[in-house]
Structure formats: C-alpha cells, structure tokens
Amino acid sequence: MGAKQEAQEWAETVRRYGERNGLTYEPVGGINPKDGPVALCVGGVNRLTGQLREGFWGACCDADEKEVGGFFSKAVLPTAILAKSHMPDLAQVVPAFNVESIEGHEVVTQRFQRKVEFESIDFNRRFLATVPSEYDPVQLRELFSPGFLSWVTTMDGEIDFGVNECQLWFLWRLRERSEDELKAALKNAGQLFRRLQSEMDESGINTYPPGPWHAGLEPFPQPQAG
C-alpha cells in the first residue's frame, strides 16, 4: 500500500468513527467563532470533537506526523494521537506539568523544568514528570495519590500527558493506524480524564460536571463545590 493510500484510509477510518459516535470530524481543525469558547487541537489533522468516550469531552487529532513514501507517493502520516480537554479547575492547582514516558524514546529535561519524583518506584521508572521552574513540584506530588500513580503504570501503551494553557493533553503513540488503536487512545485518555477528576474531588477542589464545555463547544457553567 502506498503512503498516500494509507493516509486516505486512515482519514476515512477517523471520519467513520466520528460519524458512528456523533462526533464532529474535520480534515483540518479550525478555530471557534469570535467570542465563543476556545477550540482544541487548532490546525490538527483529522480532528474529532465532542464526547470522545462516555463522560470524556474534548478533541483529538493526528500528532507527531512524519513524511513517508517514495517520490511519487509521499504523504504525511501520524505516529501518535493527541487528545485534549479544557480543565481550568485542574490548572488552578497545577498550572503546567509534563509526564513523559521513558519507554521507547529519549526524554530530554530542559533547564527551565524541575523534575518531580514520587514515592512510586514503578512510576518513576516508567515516567519522567516535570514542572516549569517557577512552579512548586510539591503541588503535583500532592495531586497524584498512590492509587493514581499505580493506575497510570497499568496503561499498556506508550503515553505522555500533562497540563498546558488550562488544557489537559494526552498523547498516545500508535502501534498501528487502525480503528482499534484509535479506540484504545480515546479509551485511555478518557480514563485519565476521569481519574484526575476523581483526584480533584478527593482533594476538595471545585470541579465541573463532564460536558461539552470541556470540548470547547459551550461556555463553562458555574463550578460545583467539591
């Protein structure tokens, strides 16, 4: 199969999945209308927006694309899927952090980041967690309970996740470009979203009920008391 055909088949796979699950599919994700909620995955190829999994609202798109194929059949194909969700309540506690998988690729810690180590040896062995130098790493350590750290290490894929610009992001590296992989990416992203909401509930942090506001489709309602 040529690279162009593979790209077309992948786009059709994503489009069909979105159609069957009531999601909005866009070949290239645009921005929301003026004065509307902020869009997610702006400019992302093969963007899906809506309730990606039950209880998980957000948007996803192709990520870490690379050009493959010969001279007459070149195409850009994704090696990962990126999912995002608006989480301003989480960002109030930890404005920015990155958790990167050490498996399968080299992780580079930049000078402006502070490494965060947890009591879980398994988590520290599998992931590198960092926060910008201006933030206190204790906030992240206090957010992640032992149960959450243990659960994250049970994910069978190669993942990264974090918070940036009030958005939770989740990166799933594709083992193949198939509907099963798309489902796996969104399933794990949804589980992460729900687990983090549970962590915030247990910490008494105000949270919002899952809804279209997390996907940038409606304004956020008044926050619920935790």
Image (cartoon, helix red, strand yellow):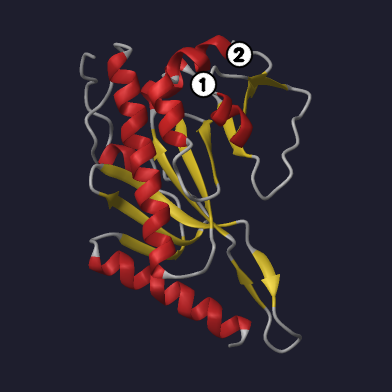
Q: Please provide percent x and percent y for residue 76.
A: 63, 71
Residue closer to the observer: 209 or 116: 116
Q: Quadrant of residue 25?
A: bottom left
Q: Please provide percent x and percent y for residue 78.
A: 58, 64
Could you tell me which quadrant the N terminus lies in?
bottom right
Residue furthest front in the image: 121
Query: Label 2's element?
Result: loop
In the displayed structure, does residue 190 sit left or right of residue 73? left
Instruction: Look at the picture and state if 169 lies above or below 181.
Output: above
In the displayed structure, does residue 179 sit left or right of residue 159? left
Q: Please provide percent x and percent y for residue 4.
A: 59, 82
Instruction: Look at the picture and state if 60 lies above or below 164.
Output: below
Residue 95, labelled with which disc? 1
Residue 189, labelled with which disc? none
Residue found 54% across the figure and 85% down from its top = 5
Q: Amino acid at mark 1?
A: Pro
Residue 216 in view: no
Instruction: Look at the picture and state if 17 lies above or below 101.
Output: below
Q: Please provide percent x and percent y for residue 37.
A: 35, 39
Q: Amino acid at mark 2?
A: Tyr
Name which of mark 2 and mark 1 comes first in the sequence: 1
Residue pointed to by mark 2: 135
Residue found 51% across the figure and 21% down from its top = 95
Q: Residues within 10 Å of mark 2 (few under 14, many from 20)?
A: some
